[in-house]
């Protein structure tokens, strides 16, 4: 799949160029040659050419019974059971397991990878043997590419429930480990007990149903159905018998399962690893766990010797543990095979694979899904709960059509309309808005200008979507010799700062938004945020400097959340105190509006309620005015009862309150009647 094959075909599967051999040929991993095997044809009638488990030869059952009876009576020094027909059959099946298999499907030669053939023909699951499905075919191609790519550590899969992912994962960890000496297979799930169930259901049970020639000897001292691990070696015995087994040839490989703990496999070598339900761990940060596991997949010289399969559905988590819910999404983002690093790997070392729910139902005899029919069924099901946002959100995540839907937030936690947020995120992914990353500075002539950031300014800078019209920059008036912004009617700036003067990497972040007031004559470009400043500079004055320069450049007033007072002194010392806005009246309790209006934005219960109310309205009716993906992501997790962690959303809520505040546009007064003094010659 990874190496190009002369005369073969290439199929693109989610960004991976998978190489298939020519029709009827396989690449023999033992001889390293392309060899002809032909195309199996179950029936001459094209309509009957679909996958059906290939029946055993007529002699097969009797011969296998003879083999069993022979082994029961066999002494250690006797030769192994031999039957010429059986030996030929074993060679055939091992060849197909290792090198793949061609069969005719609806008149089309179709290639199965060795792992896929083993899955369909020999891997017994809870409903018997698997059916052939085109989406599975693509998944096995993708998986084989990951296995063969020397720069890939494995595969990260997201799909809907009940689509066979667990049994495929069980085969993934078992197949290689049961044919390769001194290898280790490991399993983790969302909890230790889940890993134990996975091991029993998808490894032990199918393994015991494999034919004898695929089933290496394993240590039965742990029982016929081992609970903790499978050791592929002679059964442990004591005394003289143990000495007799010392020199016996055995595989020496192990498959076990561990708790969900981050460091459960720390220090061990893993040649195959499965992380079942890795998107639903409730107590473990799966991203941190992967950072441990990835080193288990390397040898002493840093070469990849193991492959991992991360597989999950993504549904609601009940944990409140910090970072757990975001960890899997970060792992997904860092596994994008279309965004590899300079060394040729993704940041995680994995490649990601998503199976849309519309490809998981209504299969015809040849394994093709009826996507239109399934999509109609899914949408019809959603329509029945369209007025119940909580139920709708749950159904979307159980049968996601896109990866954005798979990661959508449950509405019972988000106070805003998560459906609108998800739709806007999807739109921006397809239609990204141009953003400039800039810093404002005061030029030698004291005029404020902007420039693109340099490498040292990556952590703290403005992201801008709109600048003032040419000629409208740096507009101001004067009031008692103090400069005053002249474009407050057009927009505002809101800032959620931090109280202490220490900057640096740690602690609460500062977040500032620039926004434009709504203009009925220019609705597409107004009533929206157009600039964002976020981070924690080493010196806090850097925050105030950037806010002041932005306020001067745009001609807007700025509102700081009134929980610290150093911003007031900063602006006053520079003669720019009139660039600070006073408490918005709409954010003040009507019974207290006669009191002094401080410079800033109030943090009273009345103000907090006002912010929440306008926020709910904005995300309901004006979501299309948000062009910033980080705001949408933060808003999905926003907790009005714990605002400290959501600086981005808090400052945005302040902004929209400020933008809704009525502002009287200053008009130069002129007398109704002008008198003119005649000019005498």
Image (spheres, rainbow, N blue to C red):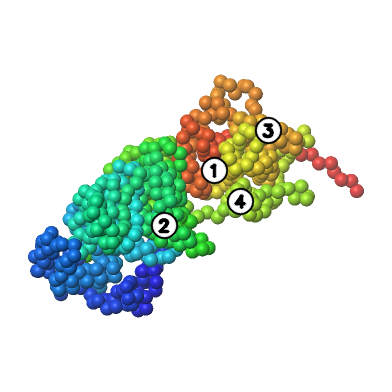
Q: Nearer the viewer, mark 1 or mark 2?
A: 2
Image quarter in which the N terminus is found: bottom left
Depth order, front residue of 12/526 = 12
The structure residue drawn at horizontal position 75% and vertical position 50%, both measured from the top left corner, is 443
Give me the residue at 29% from left, 50% from top. Answer: 229
Q: Position of residue 331 (x, y in %)?
A: 44, 51
Q: Nearer the viewer, residue 665 or 19?
A: 19
> Is there a contact, CB below 8 Å, between mark 1 and mark 2?
no
Secondary structure beneath label 2: loop
Which residue has dot 1 on it? 527
Q: Quadrant of residue 577?
A: top right
Quadrant of res 551: top right
Q: Nearer the viewer, residue 109 or 235?
A: 235
Residue visible at 20% across and 50% down in the picture:
224
Marks 3 and 4: CB-CB under 8 Å?
Answer: no
**Disc 4 target residue:** 458
Q: Which mark is residue 667?
A: none
Which mark is nearer the camera, 2 or 3? 2
Element assignment for label 3: helix
Q: Measure the alpha-carbon separation of dots 1 and 4.
A: 28 Å
User: Left or right: 180 with respect to 532?
Assistant: left
The answer to whether 152 appears left or right of 114 in the picture is right
Residue 72 placement (x, y as % from top left): 13, 59
The disc label shown at residue 297, or none? 2
């Amino acid at each position: 799949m990874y190496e190009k094959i002369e005369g073969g075909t290439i199929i693109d599967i989610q960004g991976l160029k998978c190489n298939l051999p020519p029709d009827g040929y396989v690449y023999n991993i033992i001889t390293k040659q392309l060899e002809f095997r032909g195309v199996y044809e179950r029936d001459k009638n094209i309509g009957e050419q679909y996958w059906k488990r290939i029946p055993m030869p007529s002699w097969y059952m009797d011969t296998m019974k003879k083999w069993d009876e022979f082994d029961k009576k066999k002494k250690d020094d006797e030769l192994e059971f031999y039957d010429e027909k059986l030996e030929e059959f074993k060679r055939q099946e091992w060849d197909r397991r290792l090198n793949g298999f061609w069969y005719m499907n609806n008149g089309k030669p179709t290639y199965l990878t060795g792992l896929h053939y083993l899955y369909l023909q020999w891997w017994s699951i809870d409903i018997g043997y698997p059916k052939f499905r085109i989406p599975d075919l693509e998944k096995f191609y993708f998986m084989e590419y990951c296995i063969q790519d020397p720069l890939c550590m494995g595969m990260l899969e997201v799909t809907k429930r009940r689509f066979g992912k667990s049994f495929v994962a069980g085969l993934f960890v078992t197949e290689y480990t049961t044919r390769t000496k001194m290898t280790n297979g490991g399993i983790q799930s969302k909890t230790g007990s889940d890993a134990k169930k996975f091991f029993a259901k998808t490894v032990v049970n199918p393994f015991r149903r494999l034919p004898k020639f695929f089933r290496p000897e394993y240590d039965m001292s742990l029982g016929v159905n081992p609970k903790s691990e499978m050791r592929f070696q002679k059964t442990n015995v004591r005394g003289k018998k143990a000495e007799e087994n010392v020199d016996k040839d055995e595989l020496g490989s192990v498959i076990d399962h561990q708790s969900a703990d981050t460091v459960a496999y720390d220090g061990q070598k893993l040649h195959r690893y499965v992380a079942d339900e890795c998107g639903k761990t409730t107590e473990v940060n799966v991203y941190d766990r992967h950072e441990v596991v990835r080193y288990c997949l390397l040898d002493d010289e840093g070469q990849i010797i193991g492959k991992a399969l991360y597989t999950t559905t993504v549904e609601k988590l009940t944990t409140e543990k910090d970072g757990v819910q975001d960890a899997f999404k970060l792992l997904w983002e860092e596994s994008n095979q279309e965004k590899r690093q300079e060394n040729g790997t993704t940041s995680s070392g994995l490649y990601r694979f998503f199976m849309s729910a519309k490809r998981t139902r209504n299969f015809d005899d040849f394994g093709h899904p009826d996507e239109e029919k399934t999509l109609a069924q899914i949408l019809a099901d959603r329509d029945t709960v369209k007025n119940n946002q909580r139920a709708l959100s749950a159904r979307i995540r159980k049968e996601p059509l896109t990866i954005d839907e798979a990661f959508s937030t449950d509405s019972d936690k988000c106070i805003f309309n998560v459906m609108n947020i998800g739709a806007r995120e999807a739109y921006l992914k397809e239609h990204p808005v141009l953003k400039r990353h800039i810093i404002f500075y005061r030029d030698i002539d004291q005029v404020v200008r902007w420039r693109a950031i340099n490498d040292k300014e990556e952590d703290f800078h403005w992201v801008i979507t709109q600048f003032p019209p040419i000629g409208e920059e740096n507009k101001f008036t004067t009031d008692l010799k103090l400069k005053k912004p002249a474009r407050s009617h057009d927009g505002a700036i809101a800032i959620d700062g931090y109280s202490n003067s220490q900057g640096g990497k740690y602690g609460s972040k500062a977040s500032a938004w620039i926004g434009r007031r709504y203009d009925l004559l220019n609705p597409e470009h107004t009533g929206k945020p157009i600039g964002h400043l976020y981070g924690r500079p080493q010196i806090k004055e850097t925050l105030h400097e950037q806010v002041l320069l932005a306020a001067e450049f745009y001609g807007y007033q700025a509102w700081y959340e009134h929980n610290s007072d150093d911003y007031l002194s900063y602006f006053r010392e520079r003669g720019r105190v009139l660039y600070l806005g006073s408490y918005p009246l709409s954010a003040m309790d009507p019974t207290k509006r006669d009191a002094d209006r401080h410079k800033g934005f109030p943090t009273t219960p009345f103000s907090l309620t006002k912010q929440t109310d306008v926020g709910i309205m904005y995300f309901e009716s004006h979501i299309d005015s948000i062009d910033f993906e980080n705001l949408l992501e933060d808003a999905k997790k926003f907790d009005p009862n714990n605002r400290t962690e959501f600086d981005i959303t808090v400052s945005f809520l302040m902004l929209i309150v400020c933008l809704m505040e009525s502002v009287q546009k200053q008009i130069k007064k002129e007398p109704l009647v002008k008198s003119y003094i005649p000019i005498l010659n």
